Amino acid sequence: MNLLKYAEQQLIAKTNVPDFKAGDTVTVNYKIKEGDKERVQQFTGVVIQIHGDGNVKTFTVRKISNGVGVERIFPLYSPFIESIKVERKGEVRRAKLFYLRGAIGKKAKIDELKEDGSALPATGIPKVIGTTVEPELA
């Protein structure tokens, strides 16, 4: 049994996977084989969940295509994934974003997390996380 876990760890160690979480917008370049030809297809969307552990870890990406929600589940350590690029970091409070399935319009937007720790909401008005404002005493 330990030999099997060792082989799984060696398989995982060879891949270069960026650090991302639910709420991040990612672009996945996935190899598709059609007949005897092979091409790379891009899928850009929001990560709504990360599921599993070890070499069977998967993540679900959701995007809106022509007004229809499309979700795709990718195995994280699949040999068919050419690359994963994190386009933007999202600021969310949940690990599973299934509420996005029923949300439309502005409710389906996710705030962007900037490098300095503050969040830039989808509405364009910046808000700061983790700081308090002291009331002025007159």
Image (cartoon, rainbow, N blue to C red):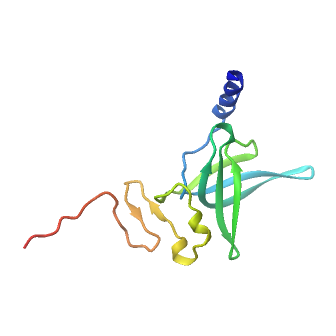
Q: Residue at x 65, y 29 (%)?
A: 9
Q: Residue at x 31, y 57 (%)?
A: 130
Q: In this orientation, which residue lies closer to the viewer: 136 or 52?
A: 52
Q: Work out which quarter of the rendered image holds the N terminus and state it.
A: top right
Q: Count how many numbered circles sit on residues in the image.
A: 0
* Residue 72: x %, y % from top left: 71, 58
Q: In this orientation, which residue lies closer to the viewer: 87 or 52?
A: 52
Q: Work out which quarter of the rendered image holds the C terminus and state it.
A: bottom left
Q: Compared to 37, does 10 lie above or below?
A: above
The image quadrant that residue 123 belongs to is bottom left
Give left or right: position of 104 versus 81: left
In the current view of this chain or complex, which residue is farthest to the left? Answer: 138
* Residue 43: x %, y % from top left: 69, 59
Q: Compared to 118, does 6 lie above or below?
A: above
* Residue 38: x %, y % from top left: 84, 50
Q: In this orientation, which residue lies closer to the viewer: 3 or 19?
A: 3
Q: Residue at x 74, y 52 (%)?
A: 30
In the current view of this chain or complex, which residue is farthest to the right? Answer: 35
* Residue 71: x %, y % from top left: 69, 62
Give left or right: position of 69 versus 90: right
The image quadrant that residue 22 belongs to is bottom right
Q: Compared to 52, does 133 lie above or below?
A: below
